[in-house]
Image (cartoon, coloured by chain):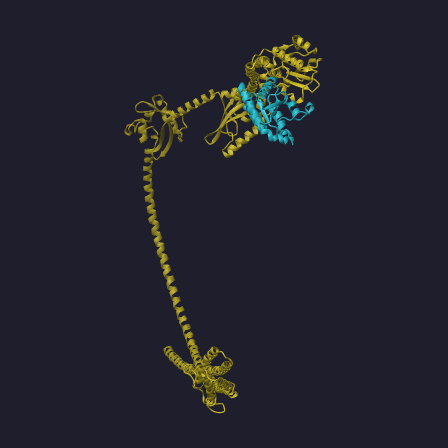
Chain colours: A yellow, B cyan
Amino acid sequence: MSSGQANSNRKSVGRRVIQGMAFRCVFALLILSTIALSGYLVNRNKSRLFRGYQQLVSLSGRQRSLIARAGLFATRIGQTSDVAERQKLKSELDELISELVDVHGVLLNGSDELKIAPAPPAVRGIFMRPPHELDRRVQSVVATLRKVVGQEGSETSDEERTIKTAVELVMDEQLLAAMEAVVKTYEVESGRSFARIRKVETVIALLTLVVIVVTGLGVFWPMVRQVRSETDELENFNAVLDQRAVELANTLQALELERDERRSRMQAMASVLEDLEEERGKLEREIQARQLVQDALAASEQRFYAIIESAPTAMVMTDNQGMIVLVNAETERLFGYEREEILGEQIEILVPERFRQEHPESRTGFFTSPETRRMGVGRVLSALRKDGTEVPVEIGLNPIETEDGLFVLSAIVDITERKRHEEILRQSEERVRSIVDSALDAVVTIDEVGNITGWNPQAEVVFGWSAEEALGQPMAKLIIPPNWRKAHKAGLARFMQTGTGRVLNQRLELTAMRKPGVLFPIEITISPLRVGDRYEFSAFVRDITARKRAEEEIKRINKELQRKNNEMQQFVYTVSHDLKSPLVTCRGFVGLMKEDAAEGRWDDVLDSVARIERATQRMGDLIEDLLQLSRIGVIRNDPEVVDVEKLLGSIAEELAERLQQANARLEIQTGMPTVYADRVRLAEVFENLLSNAIKYGCRSGNGCITVGGKKADGEVLYFVKDNGPGIAKEFHQKIFGLFQRLESNQEGTGVGLAAVARILEIHAGRVWVESEAGHGATFWIAFPVPATADQGPVDSEPEQFEAVLVTHVTSVSANTSTT
Amino acid sequence: MSPRRINFLLVEDDHDHAILVQRHIDKTRLGNVVHRVKDGEEALAYLRREGSYVQSPRPDVILLDLKLPKYDGHEVLAQIKNDPDLRCIPVIVLTTSAAEVDRLKAYNLDANSYLVKPMNHDEFSRMIEELGRYWGGWNQPSEERARS
């Protein structure tokens, strides 16, 4: 059996099966839809029946209620006497009646509007036939009620009767029973209908079941059978196909084997061909290489000549006989010859005459042991130009071995320009050196590790070390004070590491050390210098001892001036105030005097005159004392050794009269020390102190003044002591101020103690008072004892200044150990 | 009704100046100098009724010179103004000094007024008269307070 036949067979069988199944399915669906449609119709009928029944029951109920309400209205009409009320009730009753008539009509005859069918025969019987005769009874009720409505103005008894009749009719048992029967009948009717419909439904359900079973058997069972037979047929066909596939595979294998054999034979042939090709390529390359070598040789020679020609130095090639065989353009330029002029000439044509003699010899010497002599290795030579001038040159020699023998290629460099630069450089260096050497500052240079590389003559002067001693030494050891060496070293290391330094390129004031280890202040500027790939540091150092000294002096003088200025201001202020005071007195009393004179009070006038006189006197005293005070310090007498005992003796004589007046005694101790001071001022001091003692200390009448002196702690001390009332402690300072007085009624201007204080100040001494109220007062004066006999206290400034300087120097070099 | 004559305490070391002030005050008939003291110590003793001043009347106004022996005027002023009993007595500084430092110092110490002694006689008269009128009128209520 062929596969084509089997295929068409299968296709026709499939089509048949599908057609049969479709037909059966359509048939089954038609039956099912018919059953469903009939079910729907039955159901619709059932619901319509149910709705009609409901409407009838409600209408019947409505009829009953209308009748009952009509009876009620009739009763109320009978009971009401008010005409209007009755009228109203009657009209309402009328409406009830018409509605009752309508409902009754519908119940009996049905209504299209309400979709109610006419009453069935059983119901109709109730309406028309005895025993119920519902229709009649309703009609009589309606008529009676209409009568009630229609009776107007007739006799009341009539009316009452009518109403009574109506009520009776309404309440009639028969009527109610009839209406009841209607409803019941409807119930029975509808129950029957429902039973019928249920039967129909059951029939339909059964039919459906039957149809489903029939469909299952008739439609699906043949389908299953058909599919099974188809599958069996396909399985058979598959087995046949497998068998044929195996046959085909065997045939294919045989073919492949044959193909492989042919391929290997072809490969063998190809490799033979390749070998042949390779052989040919080798031969070709060999030919090419030979050609290249030939070309390269030619090019190399050309290149050699081109290089020589274009070289920036003069190149001259000679043979072993000294004959020039090759020159370049630069040679022509340098020597001024045309090429043709010197080719073939002896090399000596280019050598100055004075060397010409020995040149061939040295030339032959070179040829016996030829080796390359580099430029600059030989000494500076001279070459002769065509015009006869000489030019300084450097010559390099290269022996060249060729097939034709040994040649020498000389490179000749004109070094005129270089020599000129060297000369300029030399001069510049010399100039710098002479500047440094003649500088007034010490110039010191050090290398990266701190060793001295430069030391100019002024450095020798400032630091005391000669250049021979200093050069090559570590600078720190020589001129930096020990305490700062560590910092110096650290600073140097920091600079080498970071390239920055705190002390570089600025003017600093430091302390340096000179030869025997003496410290002194310097001003210094350090700059790093880049020399090639290394650093050097140069320092300009100036000894500023003298300047420091001068600065200190200026500071001191400034301070002194400031103090003097303040003093002067205070002085002017005080003086103006105190001088004004007597002036106020004078002018005030002059004014009073005028008035008094005008009014003839002559006693008062005289009194005023006396006061004015005293005031002017006082003013005179003040001015005199001030002049005295101002002379202190301006007029200086040379200090001398003063015998104080002697001095006091003469003062005592002068004061004798005043002492007597005050009944006071003066005791002068013996063996008092002498003092080196201004004799005149010293006398003033004692005069003032003694005068004060008499004035304030001896008022009691038996005053005693003691004067004495001693040496203690580098001072010469003197005292003036009285046994007067003393001075309270709070005034001990005040009394030395200008114009300060403790009492107003005593004579005196308040200048005396101020003058004493000033004199002692000038002598660098001190003055103070020791006293307690009621126990007298002791005034002390103290003079410093000079260090040597020939240095008086007046000239003590230099010593003081030294002291100031020393403190300053140590403060500047705070961590310097003074050696 | 004219104001009551006022009582001045005059603190003045210069006797002549004291007489000048007193005569000008007498001339104006506006006040009395109840007392004159020569230095600061005495002034404070008077005001505090110490020693011989137990019975001394309280002044209405203090006229204070600055340049005084022992304690100077500024010190006296400071003492008065730091004393709760004396603080309310007006203190008028009357001095020859026209220096700014003195003036500032006085006002900083709560001086009530600062007058420079005039050179001119008429000016002196006018100054004292104005002083009497001003402080005479001003002082009445404080006097009442002081008594109560």
Q: Is residue A484 visible?
A: yes
- Horizontal and vertical percent position of residue A647: 65, 9
- Relative to residue A288, is residue B52 drawn left or right? right
- Horizontal and vertical percent position of residue A210: 46, 85
Residue at the spot x=34%, y=51% of the render?
A: A281
Q: A493 or A403, which is in the foreground?
A: A493
- Horizontal and vertical percent position of residue A533: 46, 32
- Relative to residue A224, is residue A668 drawn left or right? right
Relative height, residue B1 to residue A135 (above, below): above
User: Which corner quadrant of the image does residue A15 belong to?
Assistant: bottom left
Q: Is residue A210 visible?
A: no
The C terminus of chain A, quarter of image: top right
- Horizontal and vertical percent position of residue A126: 48, 89
Q: A578 or B43, which is in the foreground?
A: B43
The N terminus of chain A, quarter of image: bottom left
Q: Residue furthest bottom?
A: A130
Q: A346 or A176, which is in the foreground?
A: A176
User: Which corner quadrant of the image does residue A815 belong to?
Assistant: top right
Numbered-mark total: 0
Q: A572 or A261, which is in the foreground?
A: A572
Relative height, residue A13 to residue A433 (above, below): below
Relative height, residue A480 to residue A716 (above, below): below
- Relative to residue A74, is residue B2 drawn left or right? right
